[in-house]
Amino acid sequence: MTSAALTHASATGVAIDVERDHDLFARENLLDAAMGASRFRKTSERLRAGRIPALALVARDDLGRLVGTVRLWHVDAGGWPALLLGPLAVAADRRCDGIGARLMGAAIARAKAAGHGAVLLVGDAPYYARFGFSRDAAKNLQMPGPVELDRFLGLELREGALARARGRLRPTGERAQGRSHAAPGSRRMRKAA
Ligand SMILES: CC(C)(COP(=O)(O)OP(=O)(O)OC[C@H]1O[C@@H](n2cnc3c(N)ncnc32)[C@H](O)[C@@H]1OP(=O)(O)O)[C@@H](O)C(=O)NCCC(=O)NCCS
């Protein structure tokens, strides 16, 4: 699918697009503002650090400013391939305008279209339940470190994809060779590969 086909216009003037090399600085600033430095100490980071994301999307406003970001990562979920979603963040001055929902919708649609069977994440169940995530879907899996269990959630994109998944998540994404936060398919990544 081309990035043009992926880009959706919206009533809020925001478009969803694939993340580009030049988004890196704005994206890191957005995440610093939304989550602070503690984001690097999260257990999820153990599955992301040093890997290239499977999918990275951004939201841009009509002036081209990056106002949202989401990434998904290849993991092994107890012997079964899956994606780990996160971080998801929206600029503070654009929240509650549906941008997070549009990023989630686009991420799930893209993951499904690419043939992935399941998505896992650590996050607030009251928010992610609206996209179909549940604690039940991840109940036989463990993160590779401490998490609040009621925040470890799963979504089957293909029925039964997590039914026999048991055990601890492991990172399986392509190694980033020292550039842990570059976008998939970025020029730097291709050069390093
Ligand atoms: C969570 C986040 C991505 C949501 O983005 P957003 O664009 O504001 O979300 P949407 O506009 O799609 O949805 C807004 C709705 O979600 C609710 N919501 C937002 N964050 C929520 C949360 N953590 N728990 C429960 N509900 C939440 C809002 O109250 C609002 O509810 P309403 O539809 O009943 O009015 C954004 O608040 C954010 O960036 N937060 C800081 C980073 C973060 O916490 N990331 C997620 C880690 S769990």
Image (cartoon, rainbow, N blue to C red):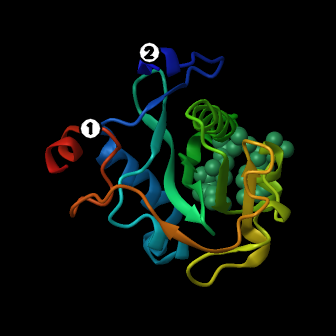
Q: Residue at x 75, y 65 (%)?
A: 138
Residue name at image x 26 percent, y 39 percent: 186
Comparing labels 2 and 1, the label whose residue is closer to the camera: 2
The mark found on residue 160 in the picture is none
Q: Is residue 182 left or right of residue 103?
A: left
- What residue sits right under mark 1 in the picture? 22
Q: Does the beta carbon at disc 1 come under 8 Å from ligand 1?
A: no
Q: Nearer the viewer, residue 181 or 155?
A: 155
Q: How many marks?
A: 2
Among the two numbered marks 2 and 1 on one chain, the one whose residue lies closer to the N terminus: 2
The residue indicated by pointer 2 is 4
Q: Tell me the amino acid under the disc marked 1.
A: His
Amino acid identity at mark 2: Ala
Horizontal side, residue 1 vs residue 165: left or right: left
> 94 and 192: which one is in front?
192
**Disc 2 crowd, CA 10 A, few/some/many (<14, 14-19, 20+):** few
Residue 27, position as x, y percentages in the image:
39, 48
Task: Answer with the quarter of the image where residue 185 lies.
Answer: top left
Q: Is residue 60 above or below residue 53?
A: above
For residue 64, above or below residue 33? above
Image spot of residue 73 (x, y percent): 49, 54
Q: Is residue 108 left or right of residue 51?
A: right
Q: Secondary structure at mark 2?
A: helix
Q: Nearer the viewer, residue 38 or 20?
A: 20
Residues under labels 2 and 1: Cα distance? 17 Å
Under circle 1, the secondary element is: helix
- Does residue 96 appear in this view? no
Q: Residue at x 65, y 38 (%)?
A: 108
Residue 3 vs residue 23: left or right?
right
Q: Is residue 169 visible?
A: yes
Q: Residue furthest bottom?
A: 146
Question: Decide: marks 2, 1 in contact (CB < 8 A)?
Answer: no
